[in-house]
Amino acid sequence: METLRSNEGFICDMDGVIYHGNQLLDGAKEFVDWLYRENKQFLFLTNASSRSPRELQKKLSRLGLEISEDHFYTSALATARFLQSQAPGCSAYVIGDHGLHNALYDCGITINDIDPDYVVVGETPDYCFEHITRAMNLVNKGAKLIATNSDLTGPVEGGFIPACRALVAPIEATTGKKAYYVGKPNPLMMRTGLQRLGVHSSEAVMIGDRMDTDIIAGIETGLDTVLVLSGVSTRETLNEFPYRPRLVLNGIGEIPD
């Protein structure tokens, strides 16, 4: 049987790997306990942009997992850091929840719905026709289109919901402009994760539930790769992709074994 290599760093997706909605998945607590027991460096890296690391920490605490805030990194943080490095002091029209707004504010990016440098799109349940119309017109006037991640759907209890790329699609279609997607599988986010862990890519593993973001991100960044079948991708959909994870497990709880 194939096993994990002697990895020192673990980059792990959250939704579909650790929990579904507000339900902790089987084996998640055992996995986290194992990470601490074995003194592993680990980071929960999520494409979701709506919550801050502190909110994610509080959510897992309510679910029974005590993990410090510094173990979380989101696509909202990655997007804010990217814009700060590209255009310090820029402004943006933002479609997204408070996690994205707060991350941009902390990086000195101002909110502007008149003549922004960027239109930034993340997940939000408040998405509406007005958002599409304003974003379309601003992009047509020259604002550059940025998206926090390229996930088309996201898992929730009982099914799936539209994710960031589904919300960006109408803006791309009506302007003819393609968004720049910052989150996984963009290597920018993965390299930041490795820097935060302080480990080399050859000493780290990417654990995720999606072939099109998590696994391809790990492969292209040189990490060991593990697909868990507790989220989006299934054994049947594996054959749709020209690449494969090195390991396929039923859930995160099999890793300590």
Image (cartoon, rainbow, N blue to C red):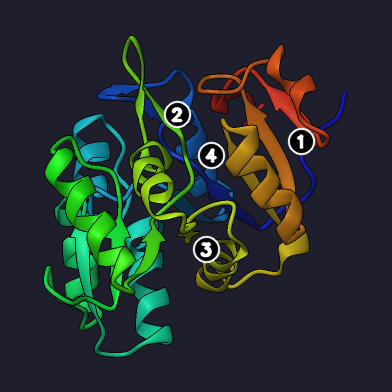
The residue tagged 2 is 28
- Nearer to me, 216 or 253: 216
Give coordinates of residue 169: x percent, y percent. 41, 42
Q: Which mark is residue 95?
A: none
SS for dot 4? helix
Residue type indicated by callout 2: Ala
State whether residue 189 appears in this view.
yes
State which quarter of the image contains the N terminus: top right
Looking at the picture, does residue 86 appear above or below residue 94? Answer: below
SS for dot 3? helix
The residue tagged 3 is 189
Give whichever of discs 3 and 4 has the lower sequence position.
Answer: 4
Measure the alpha-carbon separation of dots 1 and 3. 19 Å
SS for dot 2? helix
Looking at the picture, does residue 47 appear above or below residue 201? Answer: above
User: Left or right: where does residue 97 sit relative to residue 17?
Assistant: left
For the residues bearing labels 2 and 4, Cβ distance under 8 angstroms: no
- Nearer to me, 152 or 213: 152
The residue tagged 4 is 34
Residue type indicated by callout 3: Met
Give whichever of discs 2 and 1 has the lower sequence position.
Answer: 2
At x 35% / y 49%, what residue is drawn?
171
